[in-house]
Image (cartoon, rainbow, N blue to C red):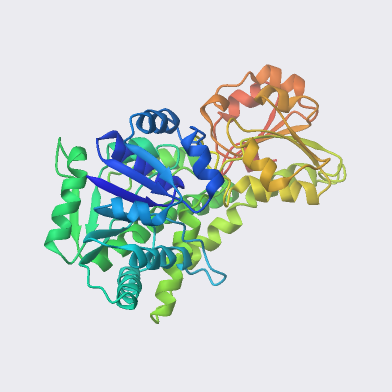
Protein backbone atom coordinates (compact mmCIF):
# COMPACT_ATOMS: atom_id res chain seq x y z
CA UNK A 1 0.00 0.00 0.00
CA UNK A 2 1.00 3.64 -0.48
CA UNK A 3 1.49 5.49 2.80
CA UNK A 4 2.28 9.13 3.61
CA UNK A 5 3.43 10.10 7.11
CA UNK A 6 3.64 13.69 8.35
CA UNK A 7 6.33 13.96 11.01
CA UNK A 8 9.71 12.27 11.36
CA UNK A 9 10.02 12.20 15.15
CA UNK A 10 9.93 9.05 17.26
CA UNK A 11 6.44 8.04 16.19
CA UNK A 12 6.52 9.05 12.54
CA UNK A 13 9.99 7.77 11.72
CA UNK A 14 9.59 4.45 13.54
CA UNK A 15 6.09 3.83 12.13
CA UNK A 16 7.10 4.73 8.60
CA UNK A 17 10.23 2.61 8.71
CA UNK A 18 8.41 -0.45 10.07
CA UNK A 19 5.63 -0.14 7.51
CA UNK A 20 8.29 0.02 4.78
CA UNK A 21 10.01 -3.00 6.33
CA UNK A 22 6.89 -5.14 5.68
CA UNK A 23 6.62 -4.00 2.06
CA UNK A 24 4.54 -0.81 1.98
CA UNK A 25 5.65 2.21 -0.06
CA UNK A 26 6.18 5.00 2.47
CA UNK A 27 6.87 8.71 2.05
CA UNK A 28 7.68 10.66 5.23
CA UNK A 29 7.16 14.42 5.25
CA UNK A 30 8.82 17.03 7.45
CA UNK A 31 9.05 20.81 7.23
CA UNK A 32 12.69 20.76 8.39
CA UNK A 33 14.76 20.65 5.19
CA UNK A 34 18.02 19.93 7.01
CA UNK A 35 16.43 16.99 8.83
CA UNK A 36 15.03 15.58 5.58
CA UNK A 37 18.37 16.00 3.81
CA UNK A 38 20.07 14.20 6.67
CA UNK A 39 17.59 11.31 6.57
CA UNK A 40 18.13 10.93 2.83
CA UNK A 41 21.86 10.67 3.57
CA UNK A 42 21.26 8.11 6.32
CA UNK A 43 21.66 10.50 9.26
CA UNK A 44 19.12 9.47 11.93
CA UNK A 45 18.02 12.37 14.18
CA UNK A 46 17.13 10.17 17.19
CA UNK A 47 18.69 7.19 18.91
CA UNK A 48 16.51 4.10 18.91
CA UNK A 49 18.04 0.58 18.94
CA UNK A 50 17.77 -1.09 15.52
CA UNK A 51 16.29 1.94 13.76
CA UNK A 52 19.31 3.23 11.85
CA UNK A 53 20.03 0.05 9.91
CA UNK A 54 16.35 -0.43 9.11
CA UNK A 55 15.99 3.14 7.81
CA UNK A 56 19.06 2.81 5.60
CA UNK A 57 18.01 -0.57 4.19
CA UNK A 58 14.47 0.53 3.32
CA UNK A 59 15.64 3.83 1.90
CA UNK A 60 18.14 2.00 -0.29
CA UNK A 61 15.39 -0.33 -1.50
CA UNK A 62 13.20 2.70 -2.42
CA UNK A 63 10.40 1.64 -0.07
CA UNK A 64 11.08 4.59 2.25
CA UNK A 65 11.50 8.18 1.10
CA UNK A 66 11.81 11.54 2.86
CA UNK A 67 10.61 14.88 1.52
CA UNK A 68 9.45 18.37 2.42
CA UNK A 69 6.95 18.35 -0.47
CA UNK A 70 3.58 17.86 1.22
CA UNK A 71 1.58 17.83 -2.02
CA UNK A 72 3.69 15.01 -3.45
CA UNK A 73 3.26 12.91 -0.33
CA UNK A 74 -0.50 13.49 -0.19
CA UNK A 75 -0.88 12.49 -3.83
CA UNK A 76 1.08 9.32 -3.02
CA UNK A 77 -0.87 8.22 0.05
CA UNK A 78 -3.86 5.92 0.21
CA UNK A 79 -3.34 6.23 3.96
CA UNK A 80 -2.08 9.55 5.34
CA UNK A 81 -0.73 9.53 8.90
CA UNK A 82 -0.53 12.61 11.11
CA UNK A 83 2.37 11.91 13.49
CA UNK A 84 3.48 15.37 14.57
CA UNK A 85 4.09 16.61 18.09
CA UNK A 86 1.38 17.66 20.54
CA UNK A 87 3.47 19.47 23.17
CA UNK A 88 1.82 20.60 26.39
CA UNK A 89 0.35 24.09 26.25
CA UNK A 90 0.90 26.47 29.16
CA UNK A 91 -2.25 25.20 30.88
CA UNK A 92 -1.21 21.54 30.51
CA UNK A 93 -3.56 20.79 27.61
CA UNK A 94 -2.23 19.30 24.37
CA UNK A 95 -1.25 21.89 21.77
CA UNK A 96 -2.95 20.84 18.52
CA UNK A 97 -1.56 23.55 16.25
CA UNK A 98 0.73 21.16 14.38
CA UNK A 99 -1.93 18.46 13.99
CA UNK A 100 -4.46 20.94 12.62
CA UNK A 101 -1.85 22.56 10.37
CA UNK A 102 -1.25 19.15 8.77
CA UNK A 103 -5.02 18.62 8.45
CA UNK A 104 -5.38 21.92 6.59
CA UNK A 105 -2.44 21.00 4.35
CA UNK A 106 -4.15 17.69 3.52
CA UNK A 107 -7.35 19.54 2.67
CA UNK A 108 -5.51 21.93 0.36
CA UNK A 109 -3.87 19.15 -1.65
CA UNK A 110 -6.11 16.07 -1.42
CA UNK A 111 -7.13 14.94 -4.90
CA UNK A 112 -8.32 11.35 -4.44
CA UNK A 113 -10.14 9.53 -1.59
CA UNK A 114 -7.92 8.67 1.38
CA UNK A 115 -7.96 7.61 5.01
CA UNK A 116 -6.39 10.18 7.35
CA UNK A 117 -4.96 8.61 10.50
CA UNK A 118 -4.32 10.45 13.75
CA UNK A 119 -1.21 8.74 15.11
CA UNK A 120 -0.31 11.64 17.36
CA UNK A 121 -1.47 11.53 20.96
CA UNK A 122 -4.45 13.86 20.91
CA UNK A 123 -7.35 14.83 23.20
CA UNK A 124 -10.78 13.30 22.79
CA UNK A 125 -12.59 15.05 19.96
CA UNK A 126 -9.49 15.85 17.87
CA UNK A 127 -10.64 13.63 15.01
CA UNK A 128 -13.69 15.87 14.67
CA UNK A 129 -11.45 18.93 14.49
CA UNK A 130 -9.21 17.27 11.89
CA UNK A 131 -12.25 16.28 9.85
CA UNK A 132 -13.61 19.83 10.03
CA UNK A 133 -10.27 21.39 9.03
CA UNK A 134 -9.92 19.14 5.98
CA UNK A 135 -13.55 19.69 4.96
CA UNK A 136 -13.15 23.46 5.27
CA UNK A 137 -10.18 23.45 2.90
CA UNK A 138 -12.03 21.22 0.42
CA UNK A 139 -14.99 23.62 0.45
CA UNK A 140 -12.64 26.54 -0.18
CA UNK A 141 -11.46 24.66 -3.28
CA UNK A 142 -15.07 23.87 -4.25
CA UNK A 143 -14.32 20.17 -4.57
CA UNK A 144 -15.89 17.06 -3.04
CA UNK A 145 -13.51 14.24 -2.17
CA UNK A 146 -14.35 11.36 0.16
CA UNK A 147 -12.08 10.89 3.16
CA UNK A 148 -12.24 9.23 6.56
CA UNK A 149 -10.48 10.19 9.79
CA UNK A 150 -9.27 7.32 11.97
CA UNK A 151 -7.71 7.29 15.44
CA UNK A 152 -4.80 4.85 15.62
CA UNK A 153 -2.84 5.73 18.79
CA UNK A 154 0.74 4.58 19.17
CA UNK A 155 2.01 2.47 22.06
CA UNK A 156 5.75 2.69 21.44
CA UNK A 157 8.20 2.60 24.34
CA UNK A 158 11.34 4.62 23.77
CA UNK A 159 14.22 2.18 23.69
CA UNK A 160 11.93 -0.59 22.41
CA UNK A 161 10.02 1.32 19.75
CA UNK A 162 11.10 -0.78 16.76
CA UNK A 163 10.25 -4.05 18.52
CA UNK A 164 6.95 -2.61 19.73
CA UNK A 165 6.04 -1.56 16.19
CA UNK A 166 7.09 -4.81 14.53
CA UNK A 167 5.51 -7.01 17.22
CA UNK A 168 2.64 -4.95 18.67
CA UNK A 169 0.63 -6.32 21.57
CA UNK A 170 -2.44 -4.45 20.27
CA UNK A 171 -3.38 -2.25 17.32
CA UNK A 172 -6.16 0.12 18.33
CA UNK A 173 -8.30 1.37 15.44
CA UNK A 174 -11.01 3.91 16.19
CA UNK A 175 -13.27 4.56 13.22
CA UNK A 176 -16.86 5.22 12.21
CA UNK A 177 -16.50 3.70 8.76
CA UNK A 178 -16.34 -0.03 7.98
CA UNK A 179 -14.41 0.79 4.79
CA UNK A 180 -11.77 2.69 6.77
CA UNK A 181 -11.39 -0.20 9.22
CA UNK A 182 -10.98 -2.63 6.31
CA UNK A 183 -8.25 -0.46 4.80
CA UNK A 184 -6.43 -0.22 8.12
CA UNK A 185 -6.64 -3.98 8.54
CA UNK A 186 -5.02 -4.39 5.12
CA UNK A 187 -2.27 -1.99 6.16
CA UNK A 188 -1.54 -3.87 9.37
CA UNK A 189 -2.07 -7.39 8.01
CA UNK A 190 1.69 -8.20 8.04
CA UNK A 191 1.74 -7.62 11.82
CA UNK A 192 -1.25 -9.90 12.41
CA UNK A 193 -0.04 -13.18 10.93
CA UNK A 194 0.28 -15.01 14.26
CA UNK A 195 -2.93 -13.64 15.76
CA UNK A 196 -5.32 -10.76 15.29
CA UNK A 197 -3.99 -7.84 17.29
CA UNK A 198 -6.54 -5.30 16.07
CA UNK A 199 -8.87 -3.81 18.68
CA UNK A 200 -11.74 -1.95 16.98
CA UNK A 201 -13.63 0.82 18.75
CA UNK A 202 -15.22 4.18 18.13
CA UNK A 203 -12.98 7.17 17.48
CA UNK A 204 -13.38 8.91 20.83
CA UNK A 205 -12.73 5.73 22.78
CA UNK A 206 -9.52 5.20 20.81
CA UNK A 207 -8.40 8.76 21.56
CA UNK A 208 -9.01 8.26 25.28
CA UNK A 209 -7.34 4.82 25.33
CA UNK A 210 -3.84 6.21 24.77
CA UNK A 211 -4.13 8.76 27.57
CA UNK A 212 -5.70 6.21 29.91
CA UNK A 213 -2.93 3.65 29.29
CA UNK A 214 -0.13 6.13 29.97
CA UNK A 215 -1.91 7.57 33.00
CA UNK A 216 -2.34 4.07 34.45
CA UNK A 217 1.37 3.30 34.06
CA UNK A 218 2.36 6.68 35.45
CA UNK A 219 0.07 6.04 38.42
CA UNK A 220 1.87 2.77 39.20
CA UNK A 221 5.23 4.56 39.14
CA UNK A 222 4.08 7.41 41.37
CA UNK A 223 2.40 4.96 43.74
CA UNK A 224 5.62 2.97 44.14
CA UNK A 225 7.62 6.15 44.71
CA UNK A 226 5.13 7.16 47.38
CA UNK A 227 5.51 3.76 49.07
CA UNK A 228 9.31 4.04 48.78
CA UNK A 229 9.23 7.35 50.63
CA UNK A 230 7.10 5.78 53.37
CA UNK A 231 9.54 2.84 53.52
CA UNK A 232 12.42 5.21 54.26
CA UNK A 233 10.57 6.71 57.19
CA UNK A 234 9.34 3.49 58.77
CA UNK A 235 12.58 1.52 58.34
CA UNK A 236 11.42 -0.86 55.59
CA UNK A 237 13.23 -1.86 52.37
CA UNK A 238 11.18 -1.00 49.27
CA UNK A 239 12.87 -3.74 47.23
CA UNK A 240 11.54 -6.37 49.62
CA UNK A 241 8.12 -4.71 49.54
CA UNK A 242 8.22 -4.72 45.73
CA UNK A 243 8.92 -8.44 45.72
CA UNK A 244 5.99 -8.97 48.02
CA UNK A 245 3.44 -7.10 45.93
CA UNK A 246 4.77 -7.86 42.45
CA UNK A 247 3.97 -11.54 42.84
CA UNK A 248 0.29 -10.63 43.04
CA UNK A 249 -1.00 -11.25 39.47
CA UNK A 250 -3.42 -8.35 39.85
CA UNK A 251 -0.44 -6.02 40.21
CA UNK A 252 2.43 -7.70 38.34
CA UNK A 253 6.09 -6.73 38.02
CA UNK A 254 5.84 -4.03 35.36
CA UNK A 255 6.19 -0.36 36.37
CA UNK A 256 6.55 -1.01 40.11
CA UNK A 257 10.21 0.02 40.31
CA UNK A 258 10.72 3.07 42.52
CA UNK A 259 13.23 5.63 41.38
CA UNK A 260 14.00 9.25 40.66
CA UNK A 261 10.69 9.89 38.86
CA UNK A 262 9.37 9.37 35.36
CA UNK A 263 10.12 11.64 32.40
CA UNK A 264 10.15 11.54 28.62
CA UNK A 265 7.66 12.73 26.06
CA UNK A 266 4.65 10.62 27.04
CA UNK A 267 3.87 10.20 30.72
CA UNK A 268 4.27 13.83 31.92
CA UNK A 269 2.54 15.30 28.88
CA UNK A 270 -0.27 12.76 28.73
CA UNK A 271 -1.10 12.81 32.44
CA UNK A 272 -1.27 16.60 32.34
CA UNK A 273 -3.37 16.59 29.16
CA UNK A 274 -5.81 13.99 30.49
CA UNK A 275 -6.23 16.00 33.69
CA UNK A 276 -6.91 19.09 31.58
CA UNK A 277 -9.50 17.21 29.51
CA UNK A 278 -11.29 16.20 32.71
CA UNK A 279 -11.24 19.78 34.01
CA UNK A 280 -12.62 21.13 30.74
CA UNK A 281 -15.55 18.74 31.11
CA UNK A 282 -16.31 19.78 34.67
CA UNK A 283 -14.57 16.95 36.56
CA UNK A 284 -11.80 17.47 39.10
CA UNK A 285 -9.13 14.79 38.37
CA UNK A 286 -7.82 14.45 41.93
CA UNK A 287 -5.95 11.19 41.33
CA UNK A 288 -4.29 12.39 38.12
CA UNK A 289 -3.22 15.64 39.79
CA UNK A 290 -1.79 13.64 42.68
CA UNK A 291 0.13 11.34 40.32
CA UNK A 292 1.76 14.34 38.67
CA UNK A 293 2.47 16.05 42.00
CA UNK A 294 4.12 12.91 43.43
CA UNK A 295 6.30 12.63 40.34
CA UNK A 296 7.38 16.25 40.44
CA UNK A 297 8.34 15.87 44.09
CA UNK A 298 10.15 12.59 43.39
CA UNK A 299 12.47 14.26 40.92
CA UNK A 300 13.92 16.20 43.84
CA UNK A 301 14.24 13.21 46.16
CA UNK A 302 17.72 12.15 45.06
CA UNK A 303 19.03 15.57 46.01
CA UNK A 304 17.21 15.26 49.35
CA UNK A 305 19.26 12.11 50.00
CA UNK A 306 22.42 13.98 49.03
CA UNK A 307 21.53 16.75 51.47
CA UNK A 308 20.83 14.18 54.15
CA UNK A 309 24.40 12.93 53.81
CA UNK A 310 26.20 16.26 53.53
CA UNK A 311 24.11 18.68 55.57
CA UNK A 312 24.79 17.20 59.01
CA UNK A 313 26.85 20.00 60.42
CA UNK A 314 30.10 18.46 59.21
CA UNK A 315 30.72 20.76 56.24
CA UNK A 316 28.96 23.25 53.98
CA UNK A 317 26.77 20.78 52.14
CA UNK A 318 27.53 20.15 48.46
CA UNK A 319 29.34 23.45 47.95
CA UNK A 320 32.73 22.76 46.40
CA UNK A 321 31.97 19.07 45.90
CA UNK A 322 32.26 17.26 42.56
CA UNK A 323 29.61 14.70 41.65
CA UNK A 324 29.87 11.95 39.07
CA UNK A 325 26.47 11.42 37.43
CA UNK A 326 25.77 8.22 35.54
CA UNK A 327 22.89 8.63 33.14
CA UNK A 328 21.18 11.70 31.67
CA UNK A 329 18.37 10.27 29.51
CA UNK A 330 15.01 9.75 31.21
CA UNK A 331 15.37 5.99 30.62
CA UNK A 332 17.95 3.63 29.06
CA UNK A 333 18.18 2.92 25.31
CA UNK A 334 17.23 6.45 24.31
CA UNK A 335 18.84 9.88 24.07
CA UNK A 336 15.62 11.63 25.14
CA UNK A 337 16.07 14.11 28.01
CA UNK A 338 12.60 15.63 28.00
CA UNK A 339 11.41 15.89 31.62
CA UNK A 340 14.39 13.74 32.67
CA UNK A 341 15.11 13.59 36.43
CA UNK A 342 18.76 14.30 35.67
CA UNK A 343 17.85 17.84 34.68
CA UNK A 344 16.41 18.58 38.12
CA UNK A 345 19.34 16.96 39.92
CA UNK A 346 22.00 18.85 37.96
CA UNK A 347 20.19 22.14 38.52
CA UNK A 348 20.04 21.46 42.27
CA UNK A 349 23.72 20.51 42.45
CA UNK A 350 24.77 23.62 40.57
CA UNK A 351 22.56 25.80 42.75
CA UNK A 352 24.30 24.30 45.78
CA UNK A 353 27.72 25.17 44.37
CA UNK A 354 28.78 21.70 43.20
CA UNK A 355 30.49 20.63 40.00
CA UNK A 356 29.34 17.71 37.86
CA UNK A 357 31.08 15.07 35.73
CA UNK A 358 28.51 13.23 33.61
CA UNK A 359 28.40 10.16 31.42
CA UNK A 360 25.53 8.78 29.34
CA UNK A 361 26.04 6.26 26.52
CA UNK A 362 23.72 8.13 24.13
CA UNK A 363 22.42 11.41 25.57
CA UNK A 364 25.59 13.49 25.81
CA UNK A 365 24.95 15.36 22.55
CA UNK A 366 21.42 16.20 23.64
CA UNK A 367 22.73 17.27 27.05
CA UNK A 368 25.23 19.61 25.40
CA UNK A 369 22.32 21.19 23.53
CA UNK A 370 20.24 21.49 26.71
CA UNK A 371 22.92 22.76 29.09
CA UNK A 372 25.47 24.33 26.78
CA UNK A 373 29.08 24.76 27.79
CA UNK A 374 29.68 25.66 31.43
CA UNK A 375 32.63 25.49 33.79
CA UNK A 376 30.84 23.29 36.34
CA UNK A 377 29.91 20.58 33.80
CA UNK A 378 32.31 18.03 32.29
CA UNK A 379 31.19 15.43 29.74
CA UNK A 380 33.09 12.16 30.10
CA UNK A 381 33.71 9.35 27.63
CA UNK A 382 33.04 6.50 30.05
CA UNK A 383 31.48 5.72 33.40
CA UNK A 384 34.89 5.19 34.99
CA UNK A 385 36.17 8.50 33.60
CA UNK A 386 33.26 10.30 35.28
CA UNK A 387 34.49 9.00 38.67
CA UNK A 388 37.93 10.57 38.27
CA UNK A 389 38.25 13.47 40.70
CA UNK A 390 34.66 13.07 41.95
CA UNK A 391 33.64 13.03 45.59
CA UNK A 392 30.37 11.10 45.13
CA UNK A 393 28.39 9.18 42.52
CA UNK A 394 24.71 9.65 41.62
CA UNK A 395 23.11 7.03 39.38
CA UNK A 396 20.14 8.51 37.52
CA UNK A 397 19.51 6.24 34.50
CA UNK A 398 19.49 2.44 34.69
CA UNK A 399 21.68 1.67 31.67
CA UNK A 400 22.73 -2.00 31.64
CA UNK A 401 26.44 -1.13 31.67
CA UNK A 402 25.99 0.51 35.09
CA UNK A 403 24.65 -2.62 36.78
CA UNK A 404 27.91 -4.39 37.72
CA UNK A 405 30.65 -1.86 38.46
CA UNK A 406 33.89 -2.53 40.30
CA UNK A 407 32.98 -1.28 43.78
CA UNK A 408 36.55 -1.50 45.03
CA UNK A 409 37.72 0.76 42.20
CA UNK A 410 34.76 3.04 42.86
CA UNK A 411 35.81 3.32 46.51
CA UNK A 412 39.33 4.27 45.49
CA UNK A 413 38.08 6.89 43.03
CA UNK A 414 35.45 8.72 45.08
CA UNK A 415 36.78 11.24 47.56
CA UNK A 416 33.83 10.87 49.96
CA UNK A 417 33.14 7.21 49.15
CA UNK A 418 29.38 7.61 48.80
CA UNK A 419 26.85 6.39 46.20
CA UNK A 420 23.38 7.82 45.63
CA UNK A 421 21.49 5.14 43.71
CA UNK A 422 18.48 6.75 42.05
CA UNK A 423 17.38 3.49 40.40
CA UNK A 424 18.10 0.93 43.14
CA UNK A 425 20.55 -0.94 40.93
CA UNK A 426 22.82 -2.15 43.69
CA UNK A 427 22.71 -4.33 46.78
CA UNK A 428 23.32 -2.03 49.77
CA UNK A 429 25.22 -4.71 51.68
CA UNK A 430 27.60 -5.35 48.77
CA UNK A 431 28.34 -1.65 48.39
CA UNK A 432 28.86 -1.11 52.11
CA UNK A 433 31.14 -4.15 52.26
CA UNK A 434 33.36 -2.32 49.77
CA UNK A 435 33.57 0.64 52.17
CA UNK A 436 31.09 2.89 50.37
CA UNK A 437 28.16 4.68 51.96
CA UNK A 438 24.93 3.86 50.13
CA UNK A 439 21.66 5.74 49.67
CA UNK A 440 18.88 4.22 47.56
CA UNK A 441 15.25 5.07 46.99
CA UNK A 442 13.35 3.65 49.96
CA UNK A 443 16.20 1.45 51.20
CA UNK A 444 19.83 1.12 52.23
CA UNK A 445 21.74 3.65 54.36
CA UNK A 446 19.00 6.19 53.83
CA UNK A 447 17.15 4.31 56.60
CA UNK A 448 19.57 5.24 59.34
CA UNK A 449 22.19 7.72 58.12
> Going 73% across and 50% down the picture, which residue do you hit?
347
Q: Is residue 31 above or below residue 156?
A: below
Residue 255 shows in this picture: no
The residue under the point 16% across, 47% down is 186
In depth, the one of 19 and 134 nearer the eye is 134
**Is 131 left or right of 194, judged from the image as shown?**
right
User: Which quadrant holds residue 390?
Assistant: top right
User: Residue 37 vs residue 213: left or right?
Assistant: right
Percent coordinates x, y for residue 294 in the rendering? 54, 59
Report the residue that reaches farthest toward the front. 142
- Residue 303 vertical position relative to residue 207 in the rendered view, above or below: above
Is residue 373 visible from the viewing direction of this image? yes
Residue 144 is situated, as x and y percent measured from the top left of the image, at 22, 72
Decide if residue 442 is on the left or right side of residue 177.
right
Between 51 and 196, the one lying in front of the other is: 51
Q: Where is residue 169 in the image (x, y as percent from the top left)?
A: 26, 43
Amino acid sequence: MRVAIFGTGYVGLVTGTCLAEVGHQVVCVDIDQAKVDGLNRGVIPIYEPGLESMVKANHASARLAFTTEAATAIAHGQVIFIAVGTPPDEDGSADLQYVLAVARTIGRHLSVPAVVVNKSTVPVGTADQVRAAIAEELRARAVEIDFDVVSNPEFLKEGDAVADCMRPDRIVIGASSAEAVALMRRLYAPFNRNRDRVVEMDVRSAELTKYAANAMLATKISFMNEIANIAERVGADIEQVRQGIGSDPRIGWHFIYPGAGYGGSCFPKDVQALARIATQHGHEPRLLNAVEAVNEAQKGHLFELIQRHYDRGEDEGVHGKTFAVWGLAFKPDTDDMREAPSRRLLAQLWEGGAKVRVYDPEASAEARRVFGERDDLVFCESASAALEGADALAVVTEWKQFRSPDFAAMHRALGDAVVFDGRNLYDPQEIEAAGLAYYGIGRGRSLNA
